[in-house]
Image (spheres, grey):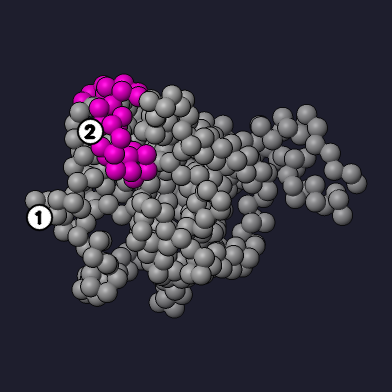
Amino acid sequence: MKLKINLKDIKKALKGTDLLLLMLTLALSIFGTIMVSSTTLDAEAGVLLSRDSKVMILAAILGLTAAMIISAIDYDIILKLWPVVGAASVMLMLLLFPFGVSPDARSDAFSWFRIGSLYFQPSEIVKIGFIITFAFHLSKVKNNISDIKHVFLLCMHAAVPILLVIATGDMGSALIFMCMFIGMMFAAGLNWIYFPAGALLVTVASPVIWFKVFDDIQRNRILALFNPEEYTNEIYQQNQALAAIKEGGLFGSGLFNGQYTQTPNAIPEVQNDMIFSAICEETGFLGALILIALFILLSVKIVAVGKRSKNFAALMICYGVMFMIISQAAINIGMCTRLLPVIGITLPFISAGGSSTVCLFLAIGLILSIYRSSDEIKYEDFRFSRMARELN
């Protein structure tokens, strides 16, 4: 049978889309594009949109398109492809060792592929792959998740991407993988006794981590939080970010009008790691509060979709995506407010970066697929799975 998608199909697709989730995501993405435009504005050159702004717009368009395509595929089909997803994720990370490069701002890591003038960070898409494979793994052992054998195998599962990411020098992404791992294990109902046991194990291993895993730059950034007078170079970026946050006050100085934000190099990497400081300076405490509220609403909505599905694997995917977004946001804000060391974590949907934005939209596409699959109204006329059957 010939494949056809008519207006009726499109209407059914829109009816099966979680519009609130989509609107929250688009609101964050649009706000992020505006802030990247502000932080990369070159007033003297008379450039309306910087290269970073154009990349953000293109990434949002590509990401949204991909999200809508993924939302039309039954997430159960994607889960069943977990061996392919897992193998592809490992292969991407392994390819970094011969082909990975370091951008100028991150000479301490070779975590990117360079494609022409663009950089692609594979760990961003590997996060999605981990969520899919780990959710499937959890669903298979959910009734006996606290058995020591299953806990060991789940830890080994998580250790693969974490160790690969650490080996490329990207400690920030490794921390996000750890947050997703711990969060999904907690949400899956792991016996609470394992969490203090894990914390004790990390404490015992901390000397090895400090001397053998962290390099001099990472150690100095941590020490700078406790002794900023001695580590002036390491703390400079965060001091400038804090000054910008204080400058913004309650209402901010206005978009494209921040004293620190609009002064070139006043805040190093202001469009990336330190973009929250620009938000605070130009939109004030109220603007930052609205942004945080959007992240909270998005996270609550994602988990609500998972609970609505009444499917354990789907719920775990939703928790994984939620923990990925909320941990990145919390760590990024902690860096900008000098509560945490700088570890190269961007603010989801907000910081400059095409690969991060596209992959976040891919994650949202998964959530939209779960929402569509669990809807009381069956959209079988639009589902790709039914179309595939018709073609056979």
Q: Secondary structure at mark 2?
A: helix
Instruction: Tell me where the magenta segment starts and ends, as one range.
Output: 249-276
Disc 1 and disc 2 in contact, CB within 8 angstroms: no
Q: In the figure, 262 relative to 191: above or below?
A: above
Residue 287 placed where, x, y %? 32, 27
The residue most toward the right is 1
> What secondary structure do most residues of the magenta stretch adopt?
loop
Q: Amino acid at mark 1?
A: Glu
Element assignment for label 1 = loop
Residue tagged by mark 2? 244
Residue under the image location 91 percent in, 46 percent down: 1
Please report whichever mark, 1 or 2, sits nearer to the chain's N-terminal start. 1
Residue identifier under label 1? 230
Question: Residue flagged by tag 2: what amino acid is it?
Answer: Ala
Kindly tell me whether residue 145 is visible in this rendering.
no
Give percent across and percent down for residue 36.
Answer: 41, 34
The front one of 33 and 87 is 33
Counting the numbered discs, the total is 2
Q: 368 or 50: nearer the eye?
A: 50
Q: Residue at x 39, y 34 (%)?
A: 40
Q: Quadrant of residue 261?
A: top left
Q: Is residue 40 left or right of residue 313?
A: left
